[in-house]
C-alpha cells in the first residue's frame, strides 16, 4: 500500500479513521499535559501513573463485570490518582527520595495489577478477553465508543487546562510567587496532576501501560528544543504527539504483527532525535556549526596576532614571514595555511614571497585592536 | 511441600536477595529508576543476541543483555550531557525507545520461537523448575537456581570487596573523588552489576518484578535504620519475606507469582511506612502530638512564672483565665492543666493554679533557650 492510498483510506475507511482519530486525540492530550510534567521535573511521574492504572482497570472489571470504556477508564484513573498521591506522600513524609518512591509505586501497583489480571484470566467466565491489550496497546481494536469517550473527556481536560492557564503557568515556573499572590497552589498542583492522570489513562488502550510514559515525556522534550515559550511549547508538543500517534497507529494497523504502542513510541522517538539535532539555536548540529565557526575565528586571530608580533620586530611592514615560522609559533593547533587563506579573504594579510606572508595596513589595525582589547580584558 | 514448590521458593528467595543487594545502593544513590530503565532495555540485547545465536540458553545472551544495560546507562548520560533534556526526561526517552525496538523485533520475527513478550515482561516462575541443570546425567536441580545463585554470589563478592569504595562513593561522592576513587568507575561497576542481576532475574520473574525487588525492600530498610550494613541485611530479609509470602499468596489466588511477590514487597513497605519506630507515619504523628502537649505545658509554665508574685497573680492564675490569655478552648486548657499536673509542673487548688519548683525550672530553661 503506498502513502497516497493510505491517505485516501484515512478518509474513507471507517476503522482506519477511528484509529487515526483516537491516536491523534491521545497525542494531543499527552503532549500538551506532558509539557507541564516535563517542565516541573516530573517526567517519570507519567511512568508511575500509567503502571499504577493497571490494577484499577482489573478491579473495575472485577467489580462491575463490564468492559465499557468509561468504567475501565474510571477504574484506571482512580488507581493512577491514588498511586500519584502515594508517591507524593512518601516523598513528603519520609526520607525516601522521589526516584525510589516512583519506582516503588510503579512496580508494586503493576505487580498487583498482574495478580488481578492472572486471577481474572482463570475465572470460569471467559468475558475477560481483551484486558491484556492494555499492556502494549492495540490501536486496531479502538471502537467508535472508545474514541467518543476519549474525545469528550479529553476536551474537558484541555478546557480545564485553558481555564487555569495562568495559574498552571505560575505553578510551573514560580510556585512560591503564586502562593504569595494567594493562589491555592496545593489545590492547583493536585488539579494539574489529575488532568495528567486523565490524559494518561485515555491513552492506555492505544499505547499500553508499559510505554505510555514515553508519550508524556517525548513530545514535550522534542517541543522544548524549538521554543522558550510555554504556549508554543504546548502547541508543538500536541502537534508532535498527534503526528506520532497517527503515523504509528496507521503503520501498525496496516502491517501484520506490529504492536501499536512500540510503533508509536518509535515514531515519537524519531521526532525527538530530529528535534535534538536540528532545532534552531539549541540543536546539536547548529551547536557544532557554531563551535567550528568560533574555533576558526580564534585560530585566525591567533595567526594574526603572531604575524603582528613578528611585524613589530621589523621596520619594513611588508617584510614577509615564512609560514614555517608561523607554524612553529602556532604549535599543536594546526590549520595555519587555512587561517592565512581566511585572513587573506578579509584583506588582512597578503602573500609576499612563495610561502611568506605579511600584514596589510587594515590587518595591522585589526591586530592592534585585538591586542588592546585583549590587554584590557586581562587588565 | 512438594519438591517443585520448595525449588520455586528457593529460586524466589535467591532472586530477591540478589536484587536487594545492588538495590540498596541504587536507592541511596537516588538512581532507583535506572533499574526500571535497565530492566526494560535489556530486552533488546536479549532479542538481538537471540537472533545471532538462535539459542535461548546461550551464555552469550546474558553478556549481550548486560552490555545493553550498560549502553542504556551511557545513552542516558550522553543525552543528559547535551544539556538539552533533564536526567529524568533522558531516562524516560531512552528506555521506551530501546524496549520498543525489542518488542517489535520479537513480534515481527520471532513469532513462532520460544520468546514471547508476556513471559519476558512478566516472567513465569512456576515454569522455572522444568529446566534442569544436568551434569553427566545427574540432575543437580533447576538451572535458574544455579544462574541466580551465581549472580547472588557475584553481588556478595563485589559488595564485600569494594564495600569501602561503594560506601564512600554513595554517602560522600565529593570526598570519594578527592581521595582518588573514580566515581565513574564505581558508577559503571554498580550499573553492570544491576544489569547482570536484571538479566538473570528477567528470565525467572520478569522485568517489573526486578524493579519491585530492587527498590521496595531497600526503601523499607532505609526507613528502619541509619547504618549501611544493617540496611543491606534488612533489605535481604524483607526480600526473602516478600518471596515466601508472595509465593503463598499466588497459590491461594492461583495468580502470577512474580506479581504476588511485587505486591507483598509493596505490602511490607506499606507496613514499614506506617509502623517504623522513628520514621513511620504513626511514630511521626505521635511525636507531633506529644510535641504539641509539651509545648502547651511549657507555655503554661512560662505564663505562670511571668505573673508569679505580681499584683495580677490572683487574676492570672485562675483556670478560666487561660481561655482569654492563651486563646485555649476550655477543653484543651483542662487537658493541658491535667497533663502539667501529672508531670509535676503545676499544682491546682480548686480553680487556682500555681507553679512547682520543677515547673519554675522548666519555664526558666525554656525562656533561656
Image: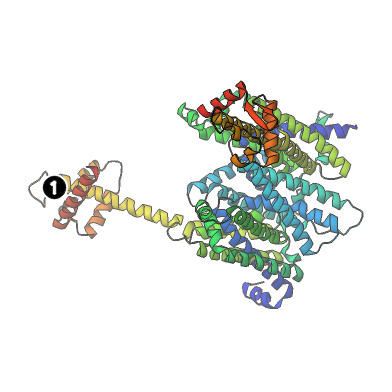
A102, A220: nearer the viewer: A102
Residue A251: x percent and y percent?
Answer: 66, 65
Query: Badge 1: how crowded within 10 Å, few (<14), some, or many (20+)?
Result: some
Q: Quadrant of residue B249?
A: top right
Image: A246 above or below A355: below
- What residue is drawn where x is 14% and y is 50%? A320
Q: Is residue A17 visible?
A: yes
Q: Which residue is mark 1?
A: A311
Residue B278: x percent and y percent?
Answer: 67, 31
Q: Quadrant of residue B248?
A: top right
Total residue callouts = 1
- What residue is drawn where x is 54% and y is 25%? B364
Q: For the N terminus of chain B, which image quadrant?
A: top right
Name the subunit of mark 1: A
- Judged from the image, the secondary structure of the residue bearing numbered disc 1 is helix
Image: B123 above or below A226: above
Q: How is the image coloured?
A: rainbow
Residue B256: x percent and y percent?
Answer: 82, 44
Please, which residue is most extreme toward the top here? B357
Task: Judge left or right: residue B310 versus residue A317.
Answer: right
Residue B369: x percent and y percent?
Answer: 51, 28
Please, which residue is most extreme toward the right here? A124
B347, A327: nearer the viewer: B347
B2, A256: nearer the viewer: B2
Task: Judge left or right: residue B335 versus residue A305.
Answer: right
Q: Is residue B369 visible?
A: no
Amino acid at each position: 500500500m503506498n502513502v497516497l492510498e493510505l491517505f485516501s483510506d484515512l478518509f474513507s475507511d471507517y476503522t482506519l479513521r477511528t484509529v487515526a482519530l483516537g491516536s491523534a486525540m491521545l497525542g494531543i492530550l499527552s503532549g500538551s499535559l506532558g509539557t507541564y510534567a516535563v517542565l516541573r521535573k516530573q517526567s517519570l511521574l507519567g511512568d508511575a501513573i500509567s503502571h499504577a492504572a493497571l490494577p484499577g482497570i482489573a478491579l473495575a472489571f472485577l467489580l462491575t463485570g463490564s468492559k465499557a470504556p468509561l468504567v475501565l477508564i474510571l477504574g484506571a484513573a482512580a488507581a493512577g490518582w491514588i498511586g500519584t498521591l502515594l508517591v507524593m506522600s512518601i516523598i513528603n513524609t519520609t526520607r525516601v527520595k522521589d526516584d525510589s518512591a516512583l519506582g516503588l509505586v510503579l512496580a508494586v501497583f503493576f505487580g498487583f495489577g498482574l495478580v488481578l489480571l492472572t486471577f481474572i484470566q482463570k475465572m470460569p467466565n471467559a468475558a475477560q478477553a481483551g484486558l491484556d491489550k492494555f499492556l502494549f496497546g492495540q490501536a486496531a481494536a479502538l471502537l467508535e465508543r472508545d474514541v467518543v469517550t476519549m474525545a469528550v473527556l479529553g476536551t474537558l481536560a484541555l478546557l480545564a487546562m485553558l481555564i487555569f492557564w495562568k495559574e498552571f503557568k505560575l505553578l510551573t515556573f514560580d510556585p512560591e510567587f503564586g502562593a504569595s499572590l494567594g493562589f491555592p497552589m496545593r489545590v492547583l498542583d493536585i488539579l494539574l496532576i489529575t488532568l495528567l492522570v486523565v490524559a494518561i489513562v485515555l491513552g492506555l488502550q492505544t499505547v499500553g501501560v508499559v510505554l505510555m510514559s514515553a508519550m508524556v515525556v517525548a513530545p514535550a522534550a522534542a517541543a522544548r528544543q524549538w521554543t522558550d515559550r510555554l504556549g508554543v511549547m504546548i502547541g508543538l508538543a500536541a502537534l508532535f504527539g498527534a503526528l506520532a500517534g497517527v503515523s504509528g497507529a496507521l503503520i501498525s494497523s496496516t502491517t501484520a504483527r506490529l504492536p501499536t504502542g512500540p510503533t508509536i513510541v518509535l515514531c515519537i522517538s524519531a521526532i525527538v532525535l530530529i528535534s535534538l539535532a536540528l532545532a534552531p539555536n539549541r540543536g546539536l548540529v547548529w551547536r557544532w556549526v557554531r563551535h567550528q565557526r568560533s574555533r576558526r575565528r580564534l585560530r585566525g586571530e591567533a595567526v594574526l596576532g603572531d604575524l603582528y608580533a613578528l611585524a613589530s620586530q621589523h621596520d619594513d611592514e611588508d617584510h614577509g614571514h615564512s609560514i614555517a615560522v608561523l607554524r612553529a609559533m602556532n604549535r599543536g593547533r594546526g590549520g595555519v595555511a587555512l587561517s592565512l587563506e581566511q585572513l587573506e579573504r578579509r584583506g588582512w594579510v597578503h602573500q609576499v614571497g612563495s610561502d611568506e606572508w605579511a600584514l596589510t595596513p587594515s590587518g595591522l589595525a585589526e591586530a592592534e585592536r585585538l591586542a588592546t582589547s585583549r590587554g584590557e580584558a586581562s587588565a | 511441600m512438594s519438591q517443585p514448590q520448595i525449588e520455586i521458593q528457593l529460586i524466589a528467595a535467591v532472586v530477591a536477595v540478589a536484587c536487594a543487594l545492588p538495590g540498596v545502593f541504587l536507592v541511596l544513590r537516588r538512581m532507583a529508576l535506572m533499574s526500571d530503565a535497565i530492566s526494560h532495555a535489556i530486552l533488546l540485547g536479549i532479542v538481538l543476541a537471540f537472533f545471532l545465536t538462535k539459542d535461548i540458553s546461550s551464555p552469550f545472551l546474558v553478556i549481550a543483555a548486560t552490555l545493553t544495560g550498560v549502553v542504556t546507562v551511557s545513552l542516558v548520560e550522553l543525552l543528559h550531557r547535551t544539556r538539552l533534556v533533564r536526567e529524568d526526561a533522558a531516562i524516560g526517552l531512552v528506555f521506551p525507545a530501546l524496549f520498543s525496538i525489542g518488542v517489535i523485533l520479537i513480534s515481527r520475527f520471532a513469532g513462532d520461537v520460544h520468546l514471547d513478550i508476556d513471559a519476558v515482561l512478566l516472567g513465569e516462575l512456576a515454569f522455572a523448575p522444568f529446566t534442569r541443570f544436568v551434569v553427566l546425567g545427574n540432575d543437580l536441580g533447576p538451572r535458574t537456581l544455579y544462574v541466580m545463585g551465581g549472580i547472588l554470589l557475584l553481588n556478595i563478592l563485589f559488595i564485600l570487596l569494594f564495600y569501602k569504595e561503594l560506601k564512600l562513593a554513595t554517602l560522600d561522592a565529593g570526598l570519594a573523588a578527592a581521595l582518588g576513587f573514580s566515581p565513574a568507575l564505581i558508577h559503571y561497576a554498580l550499573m553492570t552489576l544491576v544489569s547482570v542481576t536484571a538479566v538473570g532475574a528477567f528470565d525467572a520473574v520478569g522485568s517489573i518484578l526486578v524493579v519491585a525487588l530492587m527498590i521496595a525492600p531497600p526503601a523499607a530498610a532505609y526507613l528502619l535504620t541509619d547504618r549501611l550494613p544493617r540496611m543491606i541485611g534488612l533489605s535481604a530479609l524483607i526480600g526473602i519475606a516478600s518471596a515466601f509470602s508472595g509465593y503463598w499468596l499466588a497459590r491461594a489466588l492461583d495468580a502470577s507469582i512474580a506479581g504476588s511477590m511485587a505486591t507483598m514487597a509493596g505490602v511490607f513497605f506499606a507496613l514499614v511506612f506506617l509502623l517504623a519506630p522513628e520514621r513511620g507515619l504513626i511514630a511521626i504523628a505521635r511525636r507531633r502530638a506529644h510535641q504539641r502537649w509539651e509545648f502547651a505545658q511549657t507555655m503554661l509554665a512560662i505564663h505562670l512564672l511571668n505573673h508569679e508574685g505580681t499584683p495580677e497573680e490572683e487574676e492570672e492564675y485562675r483556670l478560666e483565665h487561660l481561655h482569654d490569655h492563651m486563646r485555649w478552648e476550655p477543653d484543651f486548657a483542662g487537658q493541658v492543666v491535667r497533663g502539667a499536673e501529672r508531670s509535676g509542673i503545676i499544682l491546682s487548688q480548686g480553680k487556682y493554679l500555681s507553679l512547682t519548683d520543677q515547673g519554675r525550672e522548666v519555664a526558666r530553661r525554656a525562656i533561656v533557650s
